[in-house]
Image (cartoon, rainbow, N blue to C red):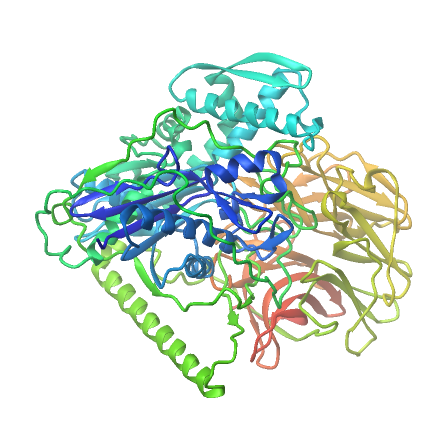
Amino acid sequence: MTYPLGVDIGTTYTAAALWREGRVQTVPLGNRANAVPSVLFLREDGSMLVGEAAARRGIIDPDRQAREFKRRMGDDIPILIGGRGMAAHQLTGEVLKFVIERVSESQGGPPRHVVLTHPAAWGDYRKNLLTQAAVQGGLHEVGLLPEPVAAATWYASQERIEPGSLIGIYDFGGGTFDASVVRKTATGVEIYGEAGGDDSIGGIDFDHALFRHVGTAAGVDVGQLDMSDQLTASAMAQVFASVVEAKEALSADVEAVVPVVLPGVSRQVLITRAEFEDLIRQRVLGTVGVFGQVVQRAGVDPSKLHGVLLVGGSSRIPLVRQLLSAELGIRVAVDAHPKYTVSLGAAIAAAPRMTGARSSATMTPPGPVRPMTPPGGIPNRQTQSRPYPTNRPPQPGYQPQYPPPQVGQRSQAGMPMPGQQRPMPGQQSQAGIPLPPPGQPPREPEPAVSLQVDLARSGLTGITDVRSVLAQITPSEPVTMTPPPRPGGGDNFTQFRTTEGKPSGGGKGRLIALLVVVIIVAVVAVLIFVLQKSSSNDSGSASKGSASSPVANPGGPSVGTISLHGQLVKVPDGGDQMTAVTGLPNGSAVAVGFSVDLQPRAWVAAEGGDFVSSPVDKDGQGKILDVTTLGSTVVGVGWTGVGNTTRAAVWTSGDGRTWNLEHPDGDFRPQSAIKQLSAVTVTADNKLLALARDDRQDKTDGDATAYTSADGKTWTPVQTTGLSGSGPQDIVRLIRSDNSFVALGTVLNGAKLGPAIWTSTDGAKWDSSPYVPQEGAPSPQGIVKQADGRLLMCGTVGSGNPPPLSCWTQKADQNWERWDVTADDGSPKPLLLYGMYPAGSSIVVVGLGQPRSGTGNDAAIWTLTVGQHK
């Protein structure tokens, strides 16, 4: 009864497939459907519902529901579900546990080998989190496989593909978009080049856009409806479900009707395919552009692709095929099953691990697949919730979306970013849109997808998944995670620490356990190295540019090296992060930031002295994101509050040693659309100029706007131009350079957020600078003007564990030059560089650092020295 199992835990749906006797087949996970919604619901008794039942219960009690948590994988801010904070990988573990139990019950025993799929762009950090989810799911070993490899494996099992052929994978699902090129080898499939994509755009965003369109057509402001009323919430959920069904119908029809039955409203809204395409065209164009860039970076002529495989439900939208053809000249010849292709491919990829699979040129006839247990045959398991401590501050942003969030960044799907309380999964969004309930189940049980596969004839006899032996953690053991933030778009390393109970053998038992773990880790590392080396040798020259190859200088060649010398700031106790720094007339330095539990922080150091912690007035949680000096007053800006009562915040101090939270009226009051102030500087006429996020005109993406103040207590809005437009415009830093202002932030570039620089002479009219570093996916965070007149920016480039640090310099309307960053042996390792301040001939920079020995990331400050050109 042994069998391998492939599991695809997607953003919106989860599916599983198994391999047995030459046949791959989906396993029904729901009562009537093969796939189930990736939704959890925490019941009052502590047990966890998964799938259809969780989606139904969440309609009337959304605070106890979690969905779309795959987008949050790697985010160190816990997701609240029923008042309990859980990490995204813990929620994923609950879904996986449900899948394994469901499949084991139906098949008469557990699978012999399980392959879990993941986006190709995930680095080691998020893949490590996925293995931790496997531990929680009760697995002792697991194989990891990139989703495009799984999809192409399914494709290769159905169509003859010669070794060396290249296949484009356009994977547009419910919650994410991924693009990649894969290469068929003699024994399997591998990633070719560098994968790309956007983990914050998907079909759910199109659902929301169409839902708003239908509400407007029906004369309903969905943002003003009382979602606390159960009847209203249920009615809204039904309308949303009808909108989703209409969207899917428009893939085959040119129009659809949505019934809108809400309090005081009862009508039908006709929507056409043309209207829907107008709503989504720009975002679909963005995904097409990303796909084209991925193909180009792989050095592939699109016309030379064996085919373009469309994966995911959103890829079924006719506009996708049209734009791929019109924009890239690509003929799309393959359309995969939207929900099951990846899980089917994962099961096929798992088959060679079964005894005899490699040598079977002709597979035996398919054996029967055991029927599923009737609904209700599997009891719910009690959720084992672990505390989620961390010894480092969260990244300055809530949703690791796009390239990971930067200070002040916001997601394209409307998720608030740093400094803002975001709606938790299952709650109402800021735009008033209820998170989607599951679609109406089919009247009859959905038939399983079953395919005969000859591994030898298809050339799929090799092992392509990376097998990991998992160290088991008992439910009572707390897990400490210390992943540094990922502002550059990639994954960082993590440290896992388990607190074990005392074994009967005392210290000797712990030593033996430690040695066992070390041996296991060493063996796994050797196996991974051997597999990678083997894959590299097999690829030969045709795999040039493969994702398995290390990328040197991801931001392009550097012109020199910038050196850092500094120290950790360990007061107060616990992990903190510095976000900005400024100087006082008396020579003191003042820094601001926040703690791991989102408490505003401030520090002060007398000239030549060490930093000490300063008490900060607060109203719940908060972050101080930027700081400046106005005469003898120090002014910090950010946000404060709890839940939906967050507001833009201003703190003032006379000497940096005590901080008062101001309570300005107007736009900065609680419940206002101005949720945070992101950056602040001083004008030539000695006034404050601050930039904020403005949701009043665009609740989904938001705009940037400006405010001025003479004292930090009374603020006046500035009528700005150039900071609004389609997609988000988010500001992370603001400085005054000569007679103009320079703002640093992000804008939507295709389907991804990219760096942007704006300039203004008066703080009202802003222009986008044509000189912005782009090579290597840069994520600059701090900017300052040096004594020689050049601008200096610092941040990260590319991806990695953690992403490499980089700085850029620019001289008067010229292109930016990139510099490598290094810290001397006596300084903490820099993980993030944020606020920067000129101090004479030196530059002071603050951020997040890591000790050279030991653990525990904390606030850090360095002096920066720009070296000579190479």
At which x and y percent is residue 458?
Answer: 15, 45
Asked which quadrant contains residue 569, the reply is: bottom right
Q: Residue furthest bottom?
A: 508
The image position of residue 494, as x and y in percent, is 51, 66
Picture residue at 50% right of the left edge, 21% below the top: 276
Q: Relative to 497, is 685 above or below? A: above
Question: Is residue 769 visible from the viewing direction of this image?
Answer: no
Q: Position of residue 455 (x, y in %)?
A: 15, 48
Quadrant in which residue 319 is drawn: top left
**Nearer to me, 299 or 364:** 364
**Residue at position x 59%, y 21% from top?**
213
Q: Nearer the viewer, residue 309 or 557?
A: 309
Q: Residue at x 49, y 87 (%)?
A: 507
Near-viewer residue (472 or 783): 472
Tell me: residue 74, above or below residue 226.
Answer: below
Q: Does residue 696 appear left or right of residue 144 in this picture?
A: right
So how many labels did they put on this image?
Answer: 0
Looking at the picture, how far across and down is residue 109, in whole percent? 28, 53
Direction from residue 108 to residue 615 in the image, left or right: right
Outermost residue to the left: 362
Please give the name of the residue rendered at 61% of the width and 42% of the height, measured from the top-left corner.
Answer: 415
Above or below — where is 77 with respect to 320?
A: below
Q: Is residue 140 something one can see in this rendering?
A: yes
- When asked about the image quadrant of residue 606, the answer is bottom right
